[in-house]
Image (cartoon, helix red, strand yellow):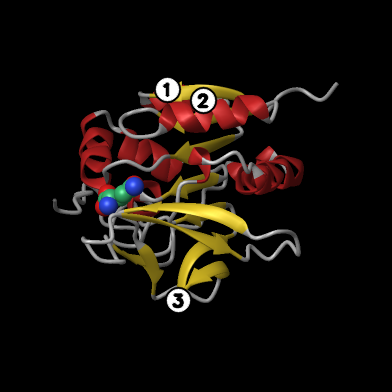
Amino acid sequence: MEKPLKMGVLALQGNFREHAAVLRRLGAEPIEVRLPEHLDGLDGLIIPGGESTAIGRLMRLYGLDEAVREFGGPIFGTCAGMIVLDRDHLGLGDYTTRRNAFGRQVRSFEADLDVGDGDEPFRAVFIRAPWLEEPGADVEVLAEVDGHPVLAREGRLLVAAFHPELTDDTRIHERFLNIVREETRVGSTERDTGAKVPGLPAQGAEINVGA
Ligand code: GLN
């Protein structure tokens, strides 16, 4: 039998338990990441939704900002996690985000997304959600709401503005696990040469996205 994938879930704040539950359902082994050394030996990492300001602060406090920048494996960022990965924060993704983009009044809503797999629409839950802006050339937009990108892939990164961990539909997590399988096949040798880090902020730059 195939060895279960060891999947880190950044467990500082937000919906990490829900992501862990989906991973377990899909046969992966979730590992809660609270310190840089917890990233050792992981096949992939999820940065959950929650509050991006809090997640950013705690990452800096525990040295996880640098550690995640250096983690060469696949990363899936949802909602606040998508913000944390962007050009203005960790600088791993070549895009910016507009926080609370759908308006502060519209705190949450659900939408049927065409996620491009030719299957049924994906019922997505948005909670004070961002959308993605100014995607670089390598960012492949996979789904939109009103013309705004809300699901995208850029190489080893997958980002979603919504919360796939809050519904029973596991297709987005499965898509991420497939990226992880692809990457582990291409080999750990490439991993060590370091990740592509467009727009990497200067050393010690603050991950601070305001309130
Ligand atoms: N609005 C939150 C932020 O900016 C993100 C919301 C979420 O993750 N559900 O951090």
Q: Nearer the viewer, mark 3 or mark 2?
A: 3
Residue 70, percent from left and from top: 44, 42
Residue shown at 20% from the left, 39% from the top: 57
Residue type beneath disc 1: Glu
Q: Quadrant of residue 74?
A: top right
Question: Is residue 67 left or right of 136 when viewed as pictured?
Answer: left
Question: Between marks 3 and 1, how big is the CA–CA gap?
Answer: 41 Å
Q: Amino acid at mark 3?
A: Asp
Disc 3: CA contacts within 10 A as few (<14), some (14-19) or many (>=20): few
The residue lying at 19 percent from left, 50 percent from top is 208
Contact? badges 2 and 1 (CB < 8 Å): yes
What residue is shown with label 1?
A: 37
Q: Residues within 10 Å of mark 1 (few under 14, many from 20)?
A: few
Which residue is disc 2 drawn over? 40
- Residue 72 in picture, x, y percent from top left: 53, 43
x and y percentages locating residue 84 in the rendered image: 33, 50
Q: Nearer the viewer, residue 117 or 132?
A: 117
Question: Is the CB of mark 2 within 8 Å of ligand 1?
Answer: no
Q: Is residue 139 above or below residue 211?
A: below
Q: Where is the N terminus found, in terms of image quarters? A: top right
Q: Amino acid at mark 2?
A: Asp
Instruction: Choose the circle earlier in sequence order: 3 or 2.
Output: 2
Residues under numbered marks 3 and 1 in contact, where contact means CB atoms less than 8 Å apart: no
Nearer to me, 190 or 199:
199
Q: Secondary structure at mark 1?
A: helix
Q: Identify the mark nearer the N-term, 3 or 1.
A: 1
| Residue 146 - label | 3
Describe the element under mark 3 as helix, strand or loop. Answer: loop
**In the image, what residue occupies the spot 62% across and 24% down?**
24
Q: Is residue 87 above or below residue 157?
A: below
Secondary structure under tag 2 reads: loop
